[in-house]
Amino acid sequence: MNLIRLLPPAAALVLVGAWLGILRLSIAAMEAQNGMLRKHIAAARLVGSTGEGAQASTAADKLAKDGGPLDWPKLAGVVAEMQKSGGLGDLRTMVHLQQRLRTMSADQLVAALDDIAALGLPAASRAMLEPLLITQLIEQDPALVLARFADRLDEHDDAMNGQLAAALKALAKTDPRKAVAWFDGQVAAGKFDSAALNGKSPARLQFEGALLGVLLTADPSSAAGRLAALPDDQRAEAIGNASLSSSTKADLTAFARLVRSQVPAADQAAAFARQAGQWVTQGGYPNVTEFLNTLKLTSDERVACIEQAVATQVFSNNKRLATADLDTLREWVGTQAPQLTASITGKVLCTAALDSRKLDFGHAAELAVQYSQASGNDDVLVAFVENWAARSNKDEARDLAAKISDAKRRAEMLKRLE
């Protein structure tokens, strides 16, 4: 079984069956980023009564009231550092920015977006700043976001598509008919036409998911009709994209009912797993535990959800993989499906070492050996070797296979690597 079957968020971002596809931004990733900023503000307020915390809070409050122009190039650097570190970064500046954005009207936010566009910033800097303003604009006027940025659908920009899908979802909550009319109009205009041989448009399925997440409870028959209108092989991705990570038990029950009734049996595990990826983005492993405990899943579906949750949690950011992260995922998998702990650990280490994205190869191999020794068997090391041999370098895999302590398994693995 492939460790990843699907998904982005934010998206954070979709290569079915491949770990690296997790880097695409998704609606969930976008919402998680905005939620992280809100948590930063809350954290700053909690320490606002003492020492440096009080000074930081006072400074942020003062800056938030300042009506002067914002230094967008500088702020782009701050956001980049925050994303790179996976931490708070320059907390005071981010608090200031978030507070300032919350005081701005829709017209002011639009003007700020125009200012950013006129600065001629590098594409990467613009891509970091725009979502912050658009997210705030979505809260005020999602219809304006859809009207203003509809032409950006032609750019096939994953990040912008995530923002527009979030706006569609927000509009659907207040005016489902208007949201459906806008989206169907864009489909009719060819904005989501696909050049793929199978006719699949990941962007369209992302937007379908945004609508389905709202219609699932607001208008169940409409949700079922939209899903049934899609080709069979696209339904799992569409309903899996529905953002339900803060839903009630009744909402999840409705989601499962729709999956069972409209998605081909062979694709149902993928639909549930795609949802699990969203739940971990919103609340970490405990959130996925709640998701798993609420639904009645088959063993294969449960495995797919666990694998997807781990992949999303580990690979949806640019932070280097720490031993503590591995220990946390191993502990969680051990509570949900102990038989998967070794294989998932080996696959995570292998993927993390590819191109040294998350770990250097030497460190990843060392950890594989350490985990195997600590468990008293070679399962993690064998999983690491098998995946590394299949995806990267057989010579290095043979060197690692020689470290397998069990003579029989070592001989079998070396023979397979000849």
Image (tube, rainbow, N blue to C red):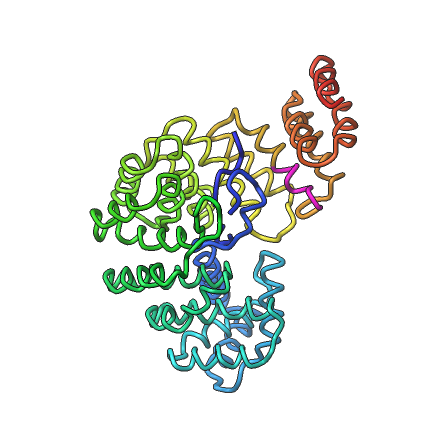
Q: Residue furthest top?
A: 408
Judged left or right of residue 366, residue 174 is: left
Q: Is residue 406 above or below residue 47?
A: above
Q: Quadrant of residue 126?
A: bottom right
The image shows residue 339 at horizontal and vertical percentages of 52, 24
Q: Quadrant of residue 288?
A: top left
The image shows residue 185 at horizontal and vertical percentages of 31, 63
Q: Is residue 31 above or below residue 53?
A: above
Q: Residue at (33%, 45%) from the top-left corner?
A: 230
Judged left or right of residue 120, residue 138 is: left
350 within the magenta span: yes
Judged left or right of residue 302, residue 81 is: right
The image shows residue 101 at horizontal and vertical percentages of 45, 75
**Front position in the image: 296 or 121:** 121
**Front position in the image: 191 or 171:** 191
**Front position in the image: 379 or 413:** 413
How many circles with numbers are drawn on the protein? Answer: 0
**Front position in the image: 236 or 53:** 236
Give the residues in magenta.
Answer: 348-355
Q: Main structural element of the magenta stretch: helix, strand or loop?
A: helix
Q: Residue at (49%, 50%) from the top-left corner?
A: 8
Q: Residue at (73%, 22%) from the top-left corner?
A: 404
313 within the magenta span: no
Q: Quadrant of the C terminus?
A: top right
Q: Quadrant of residue 141?
A: bottom left
Q: Is residue 319 above or below residue 19?
A: below
Q: Residue furthest bottom?
A: 68
Q: Residue at (77%, 32%) from the top-left corner?
A: 396
